[in-house]
Image (spheres, rainbow, N blue to C red):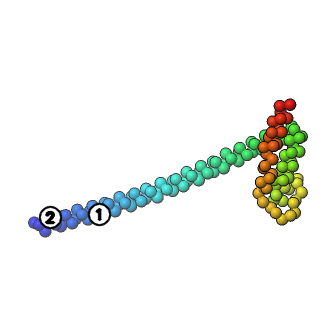
Amino acid sequence: MLAALEKEEANLKSEMADKRQKLRETEQDRRKYLAARMRRVKARLSVQERRQRTRRLILIGTLVEHELVENPKRRARFNSRLDAFLTRDRDRELFGLKPRGDGTETNGPPEASASVAEDERRDHHEQAQ
C-alpha cells in the first residue's frame, strides 16, 4: 500500500512539473508575441511621425516661399543666409547657388544660424512700420 502511494505521489509530481513547464513555455511565447507586437507598433509610430514632420516642413516651406515672394528685402536676406548655410554643392545647386569648390561640405556653419534673431527683429520692425 505504501509503495502504491509513493508511486501515485511520484506521478502527481511529474504531472505538476510538466504543467509548470508548459506554463513557462506559454508565458515565453506570450512575451515573444507581445515584444514583436510592440516593435510593429513602434515602427508604425515612427513612420507616422516622419510623415507628420515632412508635412510640417512642406507647410513651413510654403509659408517661407510665400513670404519671400511678397517681400524682396526678406528674399535678399534669406538668400544671403542660405548662401552661408548651404555647404554641400548638390544642395546649393537646388537653389541656383554656385558651388563652393573649397572641399568643405558640412551641414551648415553655426554662424549662419546666429543671424536668425537679428533677422527676426528686422522683420518685426518692418511689419510694425
In this rendering, is residue 127 above or below 35? Answer: above
Precedes in sequence: disc 1 or disc 2: 2
Residue 26 in the image, given as x and y percentages of width and height: 39, 58
Q: Is residue 34 visible?
A: yes
- Give yes or no for contact between labels 1 and 2 (Cβ–Cβ under 8 Å): no
Residue 75 in the image, given as x and y percentages of width and height: 87, 43
Q: Which of 55 and 97 is in front in this view?
A: 97
Image quadrant occupied by the N terminus: bottom left
Residue 17 in the image, given as x and y percentages of width and height: 29, 63
On residue 33, the disc is none
- Element at label 1: helix
Q: Residue at x 81, y 36 (%)?
A: 124
* Residue occupied by mark 1: 17
Tag 2: amino acid: Leu
Left or right: residue 126 versus residue 41 is right
Tag 1: amino acid: Ala
Q: Nearer the viewer, residue 96 or 32?
A: 96
Q: Which of 118 and 60 is in front in this view?
A: 118
Residue 103 in the image, given as x and y percentages of width and height: 83, 65
* Residue occupied by mark 2: 5
Q: Which residue is drawn at 88% across and 53% down?
A: 96
Q: Nearer the viewer, residue 126 or 55?
A: 126
